Image: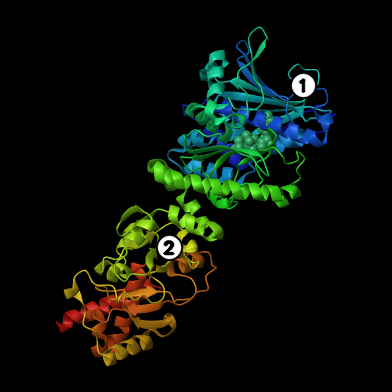
Amino acid sequence: MTTAADPTVETKAFQAEVSELLNLMVHSVYSETDIFLRELISNASDACDKLRYEAISNPALIGDGEAPKIRITPDKSANTLTIADSGIGMDRQELIDNLGTIARSGTKSFVSRLKDAKDGLGLIGQFGVGFYSAFMVAERIVVTSRRAGGEEAWTWSSAGGAGFEIASAELNDARTPGRGTSIELHLKKDAAKYLEAYEIERIVRAYSDNIQFPIELVDDKGEAKQINSASALWQRPKSELTQDDYKEAYKSIAGAFDEPAMTLHYRAEGRYSYAVLLFAPSTKPFDLFDPERKARVKLYVRRVFITDDADLLPAYLRFMRGVIDSEDLPLNLSREMLQNNPQLAQIRKAVTGRIIGELEMLADKQPENFEIIWDAFGPVIKEGIYEDFERREKLLALSRFTTTAGEKRTLRQYVADLKPNQTEIYFLAGDSIERLKGNPKLESATARGIEVLLLTDPVDAFWTSAPLDFEGKPLKSLSQGDVDFSLIPLLDDSKRNESKSATDEADIIAAIKLNLGDRISDVRASQRLTTSASCLVAGSHGPDRELERLLARQNRGAGAKPILEINLHHPLVTAIPKAGADAADLSFLLLEQAQILDGELPEDPAAFAGRLNRLVVSGFSKG
Ligand SMILES: Nc1ncnc2c1ncn2[C@@H]1O[C@H](COP(=O)(O)OP(=O)(O)OP(=O)(O)O)[C@@H](O)[C@H]1O
């Protein structure tokens, strides 16, 4: 154990995920190493933001010390590049915790994906991995930090590998900051270009121009000049800004590399005044499906960053990036105030409405851009259908579906193309389009040319469980409850099946019920099938088949038994009354083939194979 007075160096091991990540970084052949500078500047800017925020309630933290800023110093003779900030700084424990572990679960799972992915190194560039990315260009890193208001300073150093060293810093060393953090990178041989002023300026302009604090570059005479514009771009009028300004702002505010697929910039005046600059990315972030489902839009108050944890947007818009800067909120917003602030609730509601409106406009005016957003975030937007009751109809209208009639279909198109007497919108949920297309439950709809939505996102099973309608037409699952297509004409009327006599029907159903016992909740004559022998559906109440399956996978299902629907015109079914001892095998086969067609395994695959073999052999011997 070391204390502040004890100058001995203590060695600590990295958390396993950090070691894995460093190993990837150190051996990285990834060519776009520039991102390390963006990551370090972004951390430095966060540290300046935190200082400014903490200083609202404790002005002594800044006192008469220097204003928060970031300074980059290349030193060719020492082969070092130093990124220093006069931000909040870190004490000893913070250095150990922050630069020795990975706290965010999303980042952890990203690291495990990096390890497995063939294109792992490409993913690094796409997402950035914070501080650790500096090991792509540095063989050794020395971090010296002093917490604002703290008496002591500490040095963290590491050459990657298994661990790092932590020691008390010399307070009179020129490298020890009066406040904040200094990160000294001992560059690898092939990273010497990062010592060139024009390289540094180029990277800062490309990725960090919108950082709100001055970024200074120190030349070889020791003179510093500011190399970023440090303006709050969202406060400037739209008319002054070009597409390129927005693209750059997106990259530096969102820490992104892709292009924004949609930009929303406006100023709300009235009861509350605030500026909004939001972007929809064009690619998915790796933590889109993180269980936290948090929106990370940044809240500023009069140009001071407050938090990115204020839930400024509903979870189903969590892919949006950007800034909301309020003129009238108090600067010293506590966590409780953030949660219960009526003004924030009002802003959230208004901005959500604007985003939906903008998406509608985009879908109408620039469908190619809307498609980019839908392809990346459609499954997330659909969460809103069951979470945002007020905007349900709008979100349904925005949704794009693969259907039996084509791709990217809207419900509006669906409703416009309804068949005569069709009053419902039909859908079938499952895990792959191909498998759904072969599902027997579509047969009767196909015979009538009825369009069916084919839903394959896991979220589809959830939003469809709410009672929904679109333009007055209820949505109805083809694997749940009764369907009645009798009033909708067949495309080819010669295919109409003559109905069976009531006694035949009753005999067959009774025989199957007797054989299958409590494996099913009921046996019914099917309206859905034309060529296949059987299918399984859920009762009209309770979850649909697909939802039941998803819940069962998480051990949450009610375990409701399905209904077996049979095609009374299929030879396998009509054979049952005359099958004698084979009737039991035939009944089970009807159940098990329906399970297989739904993508499930029969409960006892060996018994299934045995039954099938017995029936085939007995068929041969009869023939
Ligand atoms: N210059 C700095 N000043 C103060 N704290 C810092 C600084 N650099 C890093 N840290 C601390 O170290 C933590 C880890 O940094 P790192 O870059 O690995 O991840 P992050 O910034 O939290 O996440 P990400 O970069 O993925 O958004 C930060 O959250 C911050 O608490």
Q: Determine which residue is flagged by label 2.
A: 471
Q: Are marks 1 and 2 in contact (CB under 8 Å)?
A: no
Image quadrant where one finds the C terminus: bottom left
Some atom of ligand 1 lies within 8 Å of the CB belonging to the residue at label 2: no
Residue 259 x/y as whole percent: 46, 34
Examine the image and state in which quarter residue 38 appears: top right
Which color scheme did the rendering employ for the protein?
rainbow
Dividing the image into four equal quarters, which quarter contains ligand 1? top right
Across and down, in percent, residue 425 comes to 38, 65
Dot 1 alpha-carbon crowd within 10 angstroms: few under 14, some 14 to 19, many 20 or more: few
User: Please, what is the three-letter code of the amino acid marked with disc 1?
Assistant: Glu
**Left or right of residue 534, residue 262 in this image:** right
Residue 70 in view in this figure: yes
Q: Residue at (42%, 80%) from the top-left corner?
A: 520
Q: Which residue is mark 1?
A: 66
Residue 397 pos. (x, y %):
44, 55
In the displayed structure image, the side of residue 618 where residue 294 appears, left or right: right
Q: Residues within 10 Å of mark 2 (few under 14, many from 20)?
A: few
